[in-house]
Amino acid sequence: VMDFAINKIIEKIKNDNILKLIAPYLKEVDAYLVGGYLRDLFLNKQSFDRDIVLLCDDIKSYTQNIAKKINATFIELDKEWGIYRLVLEDKKNYIDFAKAIDNNIEKDIKRRDITINAIAFNLNKCEFYDPTGGIDDIKLKKIKGICEQNFIDDALRLLRLFRFQSSLGFDIDEKTYSFVKKHVNLINNPAKERINVELMKLFEGNNTAKTLKKMDECGMLEILFPIINEFKLIPPNTHHHLDLFNHLIETVNQVEKNVKNLPQKAQEVLNIVPYGTVKKIAYLKLGAFLHDIGKPKTWTI
């Protein structure tokens, strides 16, 4: 079990240049740093995704005022939910501000997907607020849903569980996995673009092969890739010691295992983000997974 030096993490937050820049303008409200930025700090990873939840009445004018003070570009992301982005002068760094649900931080935290994404840090009091036990779950390397209803409200979260399993190497909590099995048929409801983003991030992770097996166990894989059922009909042969489905999973596994033995130059190429937000390695592994996609149609005995 990892033992976190909470004080060291608090120091990192205090010394973050972007947060230091906006700190003087957050004194009059309750402001909480939330989400992936905090999770990544605990995992000792760098993150540029700063999300801040505010408890205030008029969040739009409040964030517009901050934008003026720090010379940032103000963008309205979602008027209905009160979500705004400030893009800083360097055009690389940005901060997303959101109004807390019902102006209540506990409600806001508890409507999120998993506990490790539901840690908050009060920027004025410099203390953590963690009502769902996310810090402990990072220590235990557990992916745990906050509540079943959150997965019904947005079915994309069912797939996000597996995306985090692939990228972090954590295990999905048994109770949470039971939610997936129960509601797996909802996975086609979200927009295809959203599903696509999560799938590509899943293929980018270092634990894709293991994760694909877990997705197959609950029936999600065949909903997202209906051809899976045809793959499973093709048995081993003189060239392959595995049936076709397991051969494809094993191909992904071999890519994951052997990438680190490639020449430095090849590894650099696979780490390039050509478009969108994922590295080339994700496309290579998707190709590995589907490299025998023509076999069911051309199979003869």
Image (tube, rainbow, N blue to C red):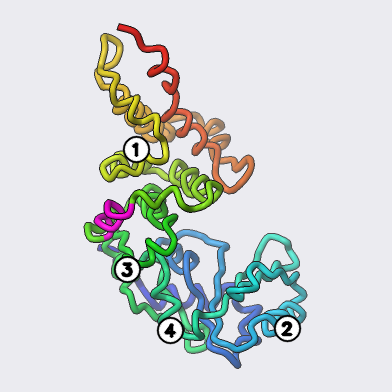
Could you tell me which residue is drawn at 73 percent across and 63 percent down? 90
Kindly identify the amino acid type of the residue bearing the numbered disc 1. Ala
Q: Quadrant of the C terminus?
A: top left
Look at discs 1 and 4 and give the one toward the viewer.
1
Gap between marks 2 and 3, in whole Å? 36 Å
Whole-percent x, y for residue 299 in the image: 36, 12
In front of the other: 144 or 187: 187
Give residue 209's mark. 1
Dots 4 and 2: beta carbons under 8 Å? no
Kindly identify the amino acid type of the residue bearing the numbered disc 4. Glu
Give residue 147's mark. 3
Whole-percent x, y for residue 65 in the image: 73, 83
Query: Does residue 113 lie above or below 163 as drawn?
Result: below
Look at discs 4 and 2 and give the one toward the viewer.
2
Mark 2 or mark 1: name the one nearer the start of the chain. 2
Whole-percent x, y for residue 266 in the image: 54, 31
Whole-percent x, y for residue 291 in the image: 44, 23
Query: Does residue 30 lie above or below 160 as drawn?
Result: below
Query: Does residue 270 lie above or below 181 as drawn?
Result: above
Kindly identify the amino acid type of the residue bearing the numbered disc 2. Asn
Pointer 2: what residue? 65
Dots 3 and 1: beta carbons under 8 Å? no
